[in-house]
Image (cartoon, rainbow, N blue to C red):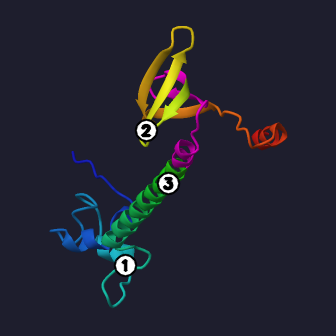
């Protein structure tokens, strides 16, 4: 007793029908009546591709192009956000002055006592006069800017708000 396996003709592509060893009938199953090529009733254009079907290579290129566009977009976003952070950090380091209260990358909090080109002397404890030399690049943030003598107090209050 043999069981016939019938598959809908929509699942069979013209390329599979032409390549089958039995002239197209082998994919439908044993004992199936008729030739699959005659039951599908499809006409092919002059270039040999079925209408409504995309070339598999073109579909892969579209996906690859979209991946490249998304990767490029993420790269640009990362690059521009990095520039903004670098500019903000550069402005912060250039605006350092004596008596600014700072926090280092290691978490040390102190007040700037003396500054050189690339080093800063901070005082961490006034009672014991504990002072440390830090590299300017290790300053993570300015906690409180010192009030300068030439700017009135009203201007510094409105600038912070």
Q: Which residues are magenta?
A: 88-110
Foreground residue among 48 and 128: 128
Element at label 2:
helix
Using the image, tell me which numbered label, if any, was put on residue 50: 1
Give the position of the C terminus as an image quadrant.
top right
Q: Residue 46, located in which quarter of the rendered image?
A: bottom left
Horizontally, residue 29 falls left or right of residue 91, namely left
Nearer the observer: mark 2 or 1; the answer is 2
Looking at the image, is 149 positioned above or below residue 49? above
Looking at the image, is 72 positioned above or below residue 157? below
Horizontally, residue 42 falls left or right of residue 97, namely left
Q: Residue 132, located in which quarter of the rendered image?
A: top left
Nearer the observer: mark 3 or 1; the answer is 3
- What is the distance, in whole Å, between disc 3 and disc 2 at their CAs? 17 Å
Alpha-carbon neighbours of circle 3 within 10 Å: few (<14), some, or many (≥20)?
A: few
- What is the distance, in whole Å, between disc 2 and disc 1 at their CAs? 65 Å
Q: Check disc 2 and report the residue beneath it.
A: 137
First in sequence: mark 3 or mark 1?
A: 1
First in sequence: mark 3 or mark 2?
A: 3
Give the position of the N terminus as an image quadrant.
top left
Foreground residue among 143 and 86: 143
Residue at 41 percent of width and 57 percent of height: 71
Looking at the image, is 29 positioned above or below residue 160? below
Foreground residue among 72 and 22: 72
| x and y, in percent, of residue 37 in the image | 30, 75
Element at label 3:
helix
| x and y, in percent, of residue 21 in the image | 15, 68
């Amino acid at each position: 007793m043999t069981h016939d396996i019938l598959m809908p003709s929509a699942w069979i592509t013209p390329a599979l029908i032409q390549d089958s060893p039995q002239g197209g009938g082998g994919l439908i199953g044993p004992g199936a009546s008729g030739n699959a090529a005659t039951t599908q009733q499809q006409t092919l254009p002059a270039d040999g591709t079925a209408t409504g079907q995309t070339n598999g290579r073109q579909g892969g290129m579209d996906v690859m192009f979209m991946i490249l566009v998304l990767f490029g977009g993420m790269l640009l976003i990362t690059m521009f956000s990095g520039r903004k952070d670098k500019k903000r950090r550069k402005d912060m380091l250039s605006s350092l002055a004596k008596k600014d209260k700072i926090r280092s990358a290691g978490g040390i909090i102190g007040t700037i006592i003396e500054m050189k080109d690339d080093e800063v002397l901070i005082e961490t404890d006034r009672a014991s006069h504990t002072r440390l030399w830090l590299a300017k690049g290790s300053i993570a943030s300015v906690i409180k800017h010192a009030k300068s003598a030439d700017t009135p107090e009203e201007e510094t209050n409105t600038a912070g708000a």
